[in-house]
Amino acid sequence: MMGLKTELLVQMDGVGNDNEGVLLLGATNLPWTLDPAVQRRFQRKIHIPLPDEKARRQLFKISAEKMEVPLGKADYIELASMTDGFSGSDISNALQDALDVPVKTVQNASFYRKVQDEGKELFTPCEESNGGAIKMTFIDVPRGKLKAPVVRREDIFAVLRDVKASVSQEEIKKCMEWTEQFGSEGA
């Protein structure tokens, strides 16, 4: 491991290399764990904070559009409010969990009903009490005949009620202290 660190430091110093037009960018969630020799080789140390409410709203808007989930302005405001202290990856992971809800619905369904979709007869999961419910599992659905449910607004909100931010207040405080001592604030 020592040889790897030494080689990295030598390369960062640019010994024997033409570095014109080269920008070395590094990122870490735990800057205080970096070797001081590595830290010294970065001219600037910029703290990029967790996304603010506006950024979280935008993350949800972009993702919901990709997922084709119909959300309104009030939904984005509420989602951003629910995720104070979340990182971008926390939000991404939560949305991935919401994408899994229809899959789990299909896997766990004991009843399906026939539906028409673009002139084709397909099967979609339903409750036993649904009119036309047929007792079957997804394995019994003929190949190419499954109409999977879509991610719904309620799925996203349900997932977010159960997940927590991965970054603790202690880590945020430690990042701020490190930034005050060694770095600068980013946007």
Image (spheres, grey):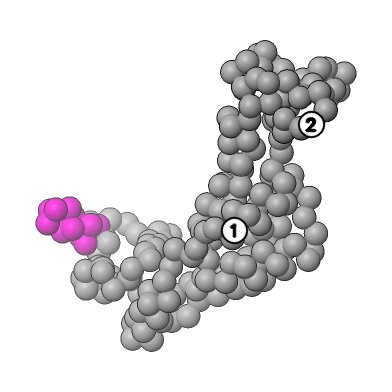
* Quadrant hosting residue 17: bottom left
Q: Seen in the image, is 42 located left or right of residue 137?
A: left
Residue reaching furthest to the left: 2
- Graded by Cα atoms within 10 Å as few (under 14), some (14 to 19) or many (20 or more), the crowding at tag 1 reads many
Q: Seen in the image, is 20 located left or right of residue 40?
A: right
Q: Nearer the viewer, residue 151 or 128?
A: 128
Up the image or down, 104 lies above or below 173; here it is above
Image x and y of residue 97, in percent: 56, 47
Q: Is residue 147 visible?
A: no
Q: Which residues are magenta?
A: 1-11
Residue reaching furthest to the right: 119
Q: Residue at x 38, y 74 (%)?
A: 171
Q: Nearer the viewer, residue 97 or 132?
A: 132
Image x and y of residue 49, in percent: 50, 73
* Mark carried by residue 130: 2
- Graded by Cα atoms within 10 Å as few (under 14), some (14 to 19) or many (20 or more), the crowding at tag 2 reads few
Circle 1: residue type: Leu
Circle 2: residue type: Asn
Q: Which residue is mark 1?
A: 160
Q: Residue at x 43, y 76 (%)?
A: 169
Give whichever of discs 2 and 1 has the lower sequence position. 2
The residues bearing labels 2 and 1 have C-alpha atoms spaced at a distance of: 28 Å
Image x and y of residue 26, in percent: 37, 62
* Mark carried by residue 91: none
Location of the C terminus by quadrant is bottom right
Q: Residue at x 61, y 47 (%)?
A: 98
Up the image or down, 88 lies above or below 122; here it is below
**Of helix, strand and loop, which one carries label 2?**
loop
Image x and y of residue 65, in percent: 73, 49
Q: Nearer the viewer, residue 76 or 126?
A: 126
Q: Residue at x 58, y 36 (%)?
A: 104
Q: Seen in the image, is 50 located left or right of residue 15?
A: right
